[in-house]
Amino acid sequence: MHGPPGHHHDHSHDHGSQNRKRLGWAFAMSSIYMVAEFVGGWLTNSLALLADAGHMLSDVGALALSYFAIWIAARPAPSHRTYGYYRAEILAALVNGASLIAIALMIFWEAIQRFQSPEEVAGPMMMGIAIGGLIINLISMSILHGGRDESLNLRGAWLHVMMDALGSVGAILAGLTIWLFDWQWVDPLASILIGLLVIYSSWRLLAEAVSVLMESAPANIDVDEVHDAMTLVTGVIEIHDLHVWTISSGLISLSAHAVVADHQLDAETLRAMREMLHDRFGINHITIQIEPEGFEESPIPV
């Protein structure tokens, strides 16, 4: 039996509308400054600045992809898509994480070339442009911060911007060092450190997205604890075929077969299990098959 979806969908719609606004503002600011960083990186001959600009390009793509994912997830679903388009945001998070790692590998390759053949970098201008990029990224992070805990998709976009902010810090420090000491090798070194930070941050995002697509139980829910809690409900003899998985961020599903002692208590037992699962574990999308004691399913021929 499914739980009433109305409240949950309204709640998701409100968050989706807020997250679209957050993404829209962050996209606009990142797009404008991305152009400035590319031009600045070319004028200063700074790999760290170009790496940061390349990362900002991925930010712009990630923000656009995240915006699209939220938009399509809110669309009315055709009858053959029984879960709608909720998984679109998980796919967006997966692409974001993979793109971060790809960018980091490109940064590593270019940095190795720079170590072998150092190039002259204009430190003061590089530092000034990186400071502007840091300011833009900090503003974008503050805009996206409110929705990052409720959406894996938005968390991916926030991680992109956070890594870009750290990249700007690295470019600022590299520009200052080059300006003061003329250590040109600091530029590719800063690029490698930026790349390592990118990989570190994106790995967890990728792992979480893959976990959702593999329909693993959410990390914050102990399935054995759910099983034990359901068996403690008055009238329940046994719980089997229990499955808990995530459809999308904030939308957890559960299905199970419950053997009950008295068939006349089906409604009361079902209501008690639903309320317990909602209040204790935050699960709203629930399907429970009630079975009388001694019931055996007929085998389905393969």
Image (cartoon, rainbow, N blue to C red):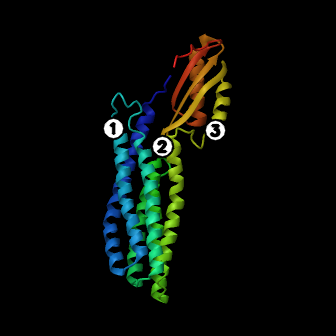
Q: How far, Cα to Cα, is label 2 from label 1?
A: 16 Å
Is 224 placed left or right of 141 in the picture?
Answer: right
Residue type, mark 2 in image:
Ser
Residue displayed at 43% across by 54% down = 96
Between 82 and 169, which is closer to the camera in this rendering? 82
Q: How far, Cα to Cα, is label 3 from label 1?
A: 32 Å
Residue displayed at 48% across by 43% down = 249
Check disc 2 and report the residue beneath it: 249
Is 272 placed left or right of 194 in the picture?
Answer: right
Check disc 3 and report the residue beneath it: 222
Q: Secondary structure at mark 3?
A: loop
Residue type, mark 1 in image:
Arg
Q: Secondary structure at mark 2?
A: loop
Q: Secondary structure at mark 1?
A: loop
Give the mark nearest the N terminus, 2 or 3.
3
Instruction: Using the rendered image of the protein, determine whether residue 258 is visible from the camera's viewpoint.
Output: yes
Where residue 159 sits in the image (x, y, percent)? 47, 58
The image quadrant that residue 254 belongs to is top right
Between 14 and 91, which is closer to the camera in this rendering? 91
Between 240 and 117, which is closer to the camera in this rendering? 117
The image quadrant that residue 61 belongs to is bottom left
Check disc 1 and report the residue beneath it: 75
Residue displayed at 47% across by 72% down = 191
93 is higher (above) or lower (below) than 176: above
140 is higher (above) or lower (below) than 272: below
What crowding class fits label 2: few (fewer than 14 Cα within 10 Å), some (14-19), or many (20 or more)? many
Where residue 252 sits in the image (x, y, percent)? 51, 36
Q: How far, Cα to Cα, is label 2 from label 3?
A: 17 Å
The answer to whether marks 3 and 1 mark residues whose Cβ atoms lie closer than 8 Å is no
